[in-house]
Image (cartoon, rainbow, N blue to C red):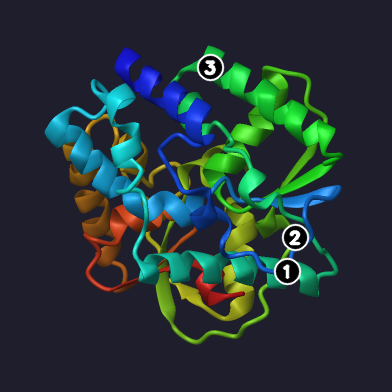
Amino acid sequence: MESLRSFLKESLDKYDMPFPVDKKVCSGWAKDLPHGGETIIFTSCMYQIEPVVPTLSKFSSMTGIFTGALKGLSSLAKLVKPSKEEIDRAYKILNNVVNALRRRGINPGYLYEDEPYSGALLLEAGLLEDFANHARRVASMLRDRGVKRVITVDPHTHNALTRYAEFVPFDVEVVNYLQLVDAEKKIEGEFTIHDSCLYSRFLDLRDRYRELISKSGIKLNEDFLVTGRETSTCCGGPIALINRDLSESIAEKRAQELNKLSNKLLVVCPICYITLSPHFRGEVKDIAEVIL
């Protein structure tokens, strides 16, 4: 854990992200959003960079990335770039969200390459002192820029930002895009769903995105033991950087359970998408790709 902590701290200090990242990849989706403002969209580069995490976790298990992290950041940075197809998909999702917000009369700004990381990985790894220090820096940055409201687009960022006030003074309103948009497309077809553990069990958004899915016309094929609030299981993604083999085992089992319900799967989290897609026999879509 100490080697992981050192790796994260070094990367955050150098790149303002938990991995070496070209921030242009993070911000390239946004072309006409205002720079900053009282209300901003906060991506934390999750959709943009998550496709490379399987590569990082594989590299980690093969070569001991965390042990040699301080020496390898510059060369590793070359690895951390998704394919064009993956980038295009992420950019489409984020633009779908922004366009849906605009149709509801909400016109968020964006911090572009200055957007900080939320600190979610620090929180979820139990590195609470480091998370508090990171939260303090992000809170100060948002305050200096006059930000009063952030709109999140993924469960891990949303969870991290809503936890800031437990560690540091933080009076910025945190709201998720799912709370603000409406389902505007009418879709015919049947899917099953994999719930985000955070959205479903901790952030009280499970019923909200099911409402949006229902309004779109999609029929969800569910089973209490597979997709129930208390009985559904994790995708396995959050543990990938610690134990890739365990992550893959969990993901394979989860995909098999879901495949029994449908060959079309909806997810609401970029980590879930990347983790389950290699194991699910059929189509996997993010909700923002389908109903917005």
Instruction: Specify which label sits upstream in the sequence, 3 or 2.
Output: 3
Task: Decide if residue 182 is in sight here.
Answer: no
Residue 149's spot in the image, x, y percent? Answer: 81, 44
Return the residue at label 1: 32
The residue that appears at 38% across and 58% down in the rendered structure is 273
Task: Describe the element under mark 1 as helix, strand or loop.
Answer: loop
Could you say which is closer to the camera, residue 217 or residue 91?
91
Amino acid carrying label 3: it is: Asp
The residue that appears at 29% across and 62% down in the rendered structure is 277
The residue that appears at 58% across and 41% down in the rendered structure is 157
Return the residue at label 2: 180
User: Does residue 189 lie above or below 107 as drawn?
Assistant: below
Task: Decide if residue 42 is in sight here.
Answer: yes
Cβ–Cβ under 8 Å for marks 3 and 2? no
Return the residue at label 3: 130
Which quadrant holds residue 244? Answer: top left
